[in-house]
Image (cartoon, helix red, strand yellow):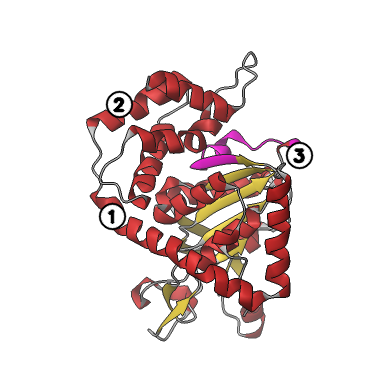
């Protein structure tokens, strides 16, 4: 089976790759929202990172990728406790998907042929322990957005259909992408994304040439290209795995909490989700770099992606949201 384009071979887009790595280290950060031009590697980065991550251990045939037989839902009818290795799941949620396809539905075939009420798992079940990717997320229908908000809040999918009442875990990293010119994202869903960033097509000629060169080599000499970049992907994988082990041992100091709170107050961000996301993201970034504690340098590095989508609009400020965050960080930490 042909693997996706290597994560380490993606040219530029450093902030996007950084955000993907951070959510792999700590999924509780809350997902990534990527706005920008088409053809800038958004979906490529998601699939490349999932392929780079260590595979998951799951019960054979389990529709929710349960790690143990005890975690398999009764409605799945799993009769084996055999554990198999699976790639980290990456599930696409298309814009035209029906509610039944997303959350699951009554299995019509079993109902007609056997007279049984059985549940057919949806996309949320398949995405459990992996990634749910939504392209053009700003065009998603409102009722699907409401479903995602409920599941993102609880980590559980609840379905009630034709006398069936089904519950199953649905914990995944939500990755959304879109073009801001085609419509804005509902504030409720925007707030659920931990990190937000903007990508653009490279303007440097040499960088554009390198993008074309690598993509052409991937398509024309797949084996040679993959053998060259496999070692680089392995280095990133080892750093992620090491960070996952270290992150629980990084302390949260009073000074760090104060820095997070002062930044969010200075920026005027609504609620407290900004502070929590900033703290988790900085901790993951510190762990990725092998640091034993969170410093202001770590906060500076991640503050734009953690806070830019939480700012109140200022019609008198022509600077972009990322620039506004950077300016306030510099003033607060001066």
Instruction: Kindly indicate whether the residue at mark 3 contacts the one at mark 1 (C-beta within 8 angstroms).
Output: no
Taking the spot 47% from the left edge, 53% from the top edge, the residue there is 21
Circle 3 residue: 182
Task: Where is residue 20? Give x, y as percent.
Answer: 51, 52
Helix, strand or loop for disc 3: helix
Calculate the distance from the C-alpha at mark 2 to the C-alpha at mark 1.
23 Å
Circle 1 residue: 246
Task: Where is residue 278? Give x, y as percent.
Answer: 40, 37
Task: Where is residue 232? Give x, y as percent.
Answer: 49, 64
Helix, strand or loop for disc 1: helix
Residue stretch in magenta: 181-197
Taking the spot 58% from the left edge, 40% from the top edge, the residue there is 197
Calculate the distance from the C-alpha at mark 3 to the C-alpha at mark 2.
38 Å
Q: Is residue 332 left or right of residue 12?
A: left
Which mark lies nearer to you, 1 or 3? 1
Which label sits on residue 91? Answer: none
Circle 2 residue: 258
């Amino acid at each position: 089976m042909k693997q996706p384009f290597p994560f380490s071979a993606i040219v530029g887009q450093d902030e996007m790759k950084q955000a993907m790595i951070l959510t792999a280290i700590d999924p509780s950060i809350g997902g990534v929202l990527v706005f920008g031009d088409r053809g800038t590697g958004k979906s490529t980065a998601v699939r490349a990172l999932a392929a780079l991550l260590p595979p998951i251990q799951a019960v054979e045939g389990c529709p929710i990728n349960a790690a143990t037989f005890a975690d398999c839902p009764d409605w799945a009818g799993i009769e084996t406790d055999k554990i198999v290795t699976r790639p980290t799941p990456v599930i696409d949620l298309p814009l035209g998907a029906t509610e039944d396809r997303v959350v699951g539905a009554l299995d019509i075939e079993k109902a007609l042929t056997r007279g049984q009420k059985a549940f057919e798992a949806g996309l949320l079940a398949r995405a459990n322990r992996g990634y749910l990717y939504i392209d053009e997320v700003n065009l998603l229908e409102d009722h699907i957005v409401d479903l995602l908000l409920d599941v993102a809040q609880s980590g559980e999918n609840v379905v009630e259909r034709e006398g069936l009442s089904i519950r199953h875990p649905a914990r995944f990293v939500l990755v959304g992408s879109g073009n801001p010119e085609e419509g804005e994202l509902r504030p409720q869903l925007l707030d659920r994304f931990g990190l937000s960033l903007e990508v653009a097509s490279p303007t440097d000629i040499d960088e554009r040439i390198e993008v074309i060169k690598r993509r052409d080599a991937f398509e024309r000499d797949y084996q040679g290209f993959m053998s060259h970049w496999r070692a680089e992907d392995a280095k990133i994988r080892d750093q992620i795995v090491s960070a996952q082990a270290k992150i629980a041992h990084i302390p949260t100091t009073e000074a760090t909490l104060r820095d997070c709170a002062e930044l969010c107050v200075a920026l005027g961000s609504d609620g407290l989700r900004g502070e929590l996301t900033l703290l988790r993201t900085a901790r993951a970034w510190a762990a990725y770099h092998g640091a034993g504690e969170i410093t202001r340098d770590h906060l500076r590095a991640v503050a734009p992606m953690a806070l830019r989508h939480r700012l109140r609009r200022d019609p008198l400020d022509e600077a972009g949201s990322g620039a506004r965050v950077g300016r306030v960080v510099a003033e607060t930490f001066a």
